[in-house]
Image (cartoon, rainbow, N blue to C red):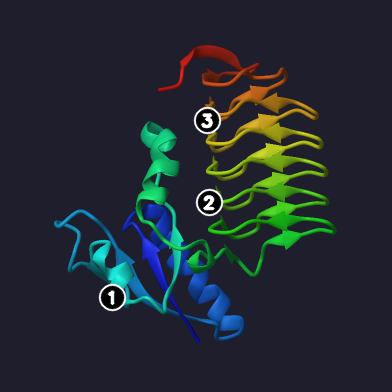
C-alpha cells in the first residue's frame, strides 16, 4: 500500500481520513501514517487509529509518503495557497482522494492535492483545479470550472457553465445559477443564491446574493 500523510490536524483532514478508510474498504490502497501539524498542542494526539506525528519535519522523515494538504476555514481561506506552498512538498508527492460514492462523468478532471467527499457529483466536462476541497453532496454541472485552492461546502449546487476563480470559498448550501462567473478570492455565504457575476475579492450572501464587503 502507498503511504500517506495528512496536513494539518483539522476537521477536513479528519474527514479525509474517513475517505481513506472508505477507499480501503473497496481496495486496500493507502497506509495512512497519520497527521502532521505545526501546533505543538496538537502533536501527540490521535484520531481513531491515526496519530498526530509531529510538525512539518515529518515530511522529511517520511520522504516515501504521499501528502494531502487540506488547510483552511472561512476566516482564513485566502491563506491556503501560501500555507500549502510553505510545506515545500514536491508536486509529485501530492495526491487526490475521491470517495468511492462520488460520481465523475465523461470529460471530468480532478487535479492534484484535491479531496472529493461522499456523494459529490461532477456531471460532465467539469474541471476541478489543484488543492480543492469539495464537501459531501455537492453537485457541479456540465462545463463548469473550479479554480485552484477553492473550498466548496456541502450541498452546494453549481449549474452548468459556471466559472469559479482561484482561492474562492463557496459556503454550504449555496446555489450558483448557470453561466455565472465568480472572481478569484471571493466568498459565497452559506445558502446564498448567486444569479449574477461576482467580481474578484468580494463577500456575497443572501437570496439573491448581494455584496457584503471585500474579502480579506
Disc 2: which residue: 131
Disc 1: which residue: 61
Say above or below: 78 vs 123: above
Q: Is residue 65 left or right of residue 172?
A: left
Disc with the residue nearer the chain's start (3 vs 1): 1
Disc 3: which residue: 190
Q: Is residue 129 left or right of residue 20?
A: right
Q: Where does the image place residue 114, in percent across and percent down from the top left?
A: 56, 56
Residue 112 visible in rendering:
yes
Alpha carbons under labels 2 and 3: distance apart: 21 Å
Please tell me which residue lies in front, 95 or 11.
95
Label 2 neighbour load within 10 Å: few <14, some 14-19, many 20+? many
Please tell me which residue lies in front, 56 or 27.
56
Residue 47 visible in rendering:
no
Q: Where does the image place residue 185, in percent across and percent down from the top left?
A: 52, 28
Alpha carbons under labels 3 and 1: distance apart: 40 Å
Label 1 neighbour load within 10 Å: few <14, some 14-19, many 20+? few
Say above or below: 204 vs 27: above
Secondary-structure class at tag 1: helix
Q: Is residue 52 left or right of residue 22?
A: left
Q: Is residue 209 left or right of residue 4?
A: right
The number of discs equals: 3
Disc with the residue nearer the chain's start (2 vs 3): 2
**What residue sits 39% from the left and 65% below the top?**
6
Alpha carbons under labels 1 and 2: distance apart: 23 Å
**What residue sits 41% from the left and 49% below the top?**
85
Please tell me which residue lies in front, 183 or 122.
183
**What residue sits 60% from the left and 85% below the top?**
27
Secondary-structure class at tag 3: loop
Q: Residue furthest left?
A: 41
Q: Where, quadrant-wise, is the C terminus in this rendering?
A: top left
Q: Where does the image place residue 80, in percent across and percent down from the top left?
A: 42, 42
Amino acid at each position: 500500500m502507498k503511504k500517506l500523510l495528512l496536513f494539518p490536524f483539522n476537521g477536513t483532514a479528519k474527514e479525509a481520513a474517513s475517505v481513506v478508510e472508505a477507499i480501503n474498504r473497496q481496495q486496500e490502497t493507502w497506509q495512512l501514517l497519520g497527521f502532521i501539524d505545526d501546533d505543538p498542542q496538537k502533536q501527540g494526539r490521535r484520531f481513531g487509529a491515526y496519530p498526530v506525528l509531529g510538525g512539518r519535519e515529518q515530511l522529511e522523515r517520511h520522504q516515501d509518503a504521499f501528502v494531502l494538504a487540506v488547510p483552511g476555514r472561512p476566516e482564513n481561506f485566502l491563506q491556503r495557497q501560501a500555507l500549502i506552498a510553505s510545506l515545500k512538498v514536491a508536486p509529485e508527492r501530492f495526491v487526490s482522494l475521491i470517495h468511492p460514492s462520488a460520481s465523475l462523468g465523461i470529460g471530468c478532471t480532478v487535479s492534484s492535492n484535491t479531496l472529493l467527499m461522499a456523494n459529490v457529483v461532477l456531471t460532465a466536462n467539469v474541471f476541478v483545479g489543484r488543492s480543492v476541497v469539495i464537501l459531501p453532496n455537492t453537485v457541479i454541472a456540465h462545463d463548469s470550472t473550479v479554480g485552484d485552492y477553492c473550498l466548496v461546502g456541502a450541498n452546494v449546487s453549481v449549474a452548468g457553465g459556471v466559472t469559479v476563480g482561484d482561492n474562492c470559498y463557496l459556503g454550504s448550501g449555496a446555489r450558483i445559477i448557470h453561466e455565472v462567473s465568480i472572481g478569484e478570492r471571493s466568498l459565497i455565504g452559506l445558502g446564498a443564491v448567486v444569479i449574477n457575476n461576482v467580481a474578484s475579492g468580494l463577500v456575497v450572501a443572501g437570496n439573491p446574493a448581494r455584496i457584503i464587503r471585500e474579502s480579506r
